[in-house]
Image (spheres, helix red, strand yellow):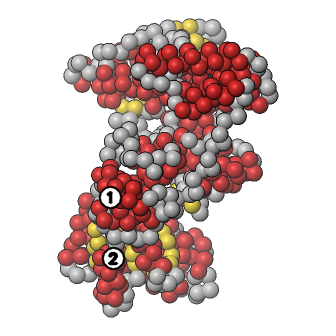
Amino acid sequence: MASWTLKVLGANALTSTGREGADGQGYCPDRKTAGVLTYLALEGPASRRKLAGLFWPEVDEARARNSLARVLTRLRRATYPDIVTGREVLRLGDELEVDAARLKIAAFQGAWETVLAAAGELLPHFEYDDSEEFEEWLRHEREALTSLTAQALRARIGALEAARSYRDALELTSRLIKLDPLQEDAHRLAMRLQHASGDRAAALKTFADLRTLLRADWNAEPSDETVALAAAIERGSTRTAPKPPAPAAVKPGSLVGRDAEWAAMESAWQLGHPIMIHGPAGVGKTRLMHEFAASKGSVLQTGGRPGDGAVPLISLARGLRRAYPSLTDLQVPTWVRSELFELVPQLGETDRKAVGGLKFEEALFWYYDAMLSRFDVVVVDDLQFYDAASFEAASRFVNRRPAEGVPARTMVAFRTDEVPASYLKHLEDLSDRGLHTLIELKPLDLSGTCALLAELAEGRAAKDHLARLAVDLHRYTGGNPMFVLETVKHLLERERLGEDFPDRLPPTGKVGAVIRQRFERLSPTAQRVAQAACVLQSEFDLTSIATLLEVGAASLLDAWHELEAAGFVTEGRFSHDLLFEAVDQTLSSPVRQLLQRAAATLRTGVAPHRSAPDVVSRS
């Protein structure tokens, strides 16, 4: 249990809550101290350099770091020495609990009453106009906390409405409207509740007040939906036209615009070359690779994962272990088992030796040949995440096959702009020497975008309209197939596919914002399931997510189906890296750390220390 509590929501107070000999001790942090503590609480560990530049941007780094040191010294003297720990990278100590971080965790857990009890403006007593970057960060955090408060209010209002507790629901609705007076759906909610409670006049007054507000502030009229609700209330009924059914899920189209690349892969296959496909995120590398591989027979899938770079040979071990169940009937030589036991423990323990050396390489050659005796193709995705030792070892045994006149039967995909420069240079050298086939996958041209849109939207809009829409869609997405797919999903969910291309979408290339908007329309439970899956990273299932969230798997079944229907997850993984990355960005630091500790316990059965460096510090 925390011994000190920092309140920064509607307050500025640092108090002891049971620390030995210090019960009731209080301290009011000054402006910079409160800012530093709040940043560490909500953003996670940060370097001294980052904090110094954030709060003292007007002076050189040495003076800024001295100012930070003085702030920390005063804070420790007034409270306790370990309130902020670390030398170069600083983090909050275990004994400190911060109300804003607790609110974010409560919102993630669906503890709405806790959220509403804690809600308030973040750091309301201070201005930070001399720290522009922190001021912008604070504005964003205030908006995020307001959004969580609104989510909590809507959840509680829904529960009260279902229980016919209209008066209590209306009190919370008034609070919801105050958060954003121009949000029409909150006014519609108030109108519906007022009418349900028998106060038709109040409902119509709410509509009239909203119309006056919109005209005064925006020279606008209420939406058709709000006008229809007001008309229904005036008639004495709130029965409005039923909402149209949700659009059918949009499935990825066929491989349009990839004939040249397919032909190049076919030529490389006939030559026995390893096939390397690279390009930007979302351009279709993985799908092209998998469809081509499937056309050649049985496939073993493996690949790199974020974080592999810090653990030598982990990327390689993943693929070798994945192949093992298909090799159990083989007589694996003792020397191979001895060399590879550390990477593939299922082989069984023998006289183990240190990994490395020529015999280790020969063991890898033997094992890879065995893999390709059971699979027609090995596909490796996300090479950009491969650790260096795995890349070096895999490169040798993959290249050895064609050098000996044996087809490589290996395909690899990676992001051009994220792969280490040394990896790319090595692959380019091999390609120049005629030993590899390196294929750059580029975005679709306009005709490709037109063809993809026509396939995705077949039967949902007129062909001539789609032809016009494709021009704007291509300009917006740059022809990136994943961006096209996500934007079409967005337009369908908003029932705007049959209209002109919207003026108000995130800027070109910012499809992540479109994905986040789709994510925000998921139910709170589906959002939590997706966020938990992000932290697990590797292939996940409903059972592991339920264990992570400490709930029964059955209670998450509807949310799981919702994620599948929305196209976020497929067969125990995110449908695309861009979806993973967009959801990952929705995780606040307090919630991320909570889930990471739970994931560590799930994997090892031992709860990690709270202050373990389980997040990357802000540098």
Q: Residue at x 24, y 76 (%)?
A: 430
Instruction: Return the x and y of residue 444 as percentages of the image width and height.
Output: 31, 63
Left or right of 329, for residue 587: left
**Front residue of 195 and 153:** 195
Residue 315 position (above or below residue 234): below
Image quarter of residue 323: bottom right
- Identify the residue at horizontal 39%, vertical 56% (top origin): 465
Of residue 188 and residue 424, the one placed in the foreground of this image is: 188
Q: Is residue 90 above or below residue 30?
A: below
Mark 1: few, some, or many residues within 10 Å (few <14, many ≥20)?
many
Under mark 1, the amino acid is Gly
Q: CA distance from mark 2 to mark 1?
A: 16 Å
For the residue pair 246 and 179, the one nearer the viewer reads as 246
- How packed is label 2: few (under 14 Cα within 10 Å), some, or many (20 or more)? few
Residue 253 relative to residue 3: left or right: left
- Picture coordinates of residue 94, whole percent (x, y): 56, 28
Q: Amino acid at mark 2?
A: Asp
Which residue is found at the position 54% from the left and 26% from the top?
184
| Tally of numbered discs | 2
Is residue 113 something one can see in this rendering? no
Identity of the residue furthest to the front in this view = 235
Q: Position of residue 361 (x, y in %)?
A: 39, 77
The residue at the far right in this view is 163
Residue 207: which quarter of the image? top right
Vertical position of residue 116 compared to residue 268: above or below:
above
Q: Nearer the viewer, residue 399 or 336?
A: 399
Image: 524 above or below 389: above
Q: Which residue was labeled with disc 1? A: 479
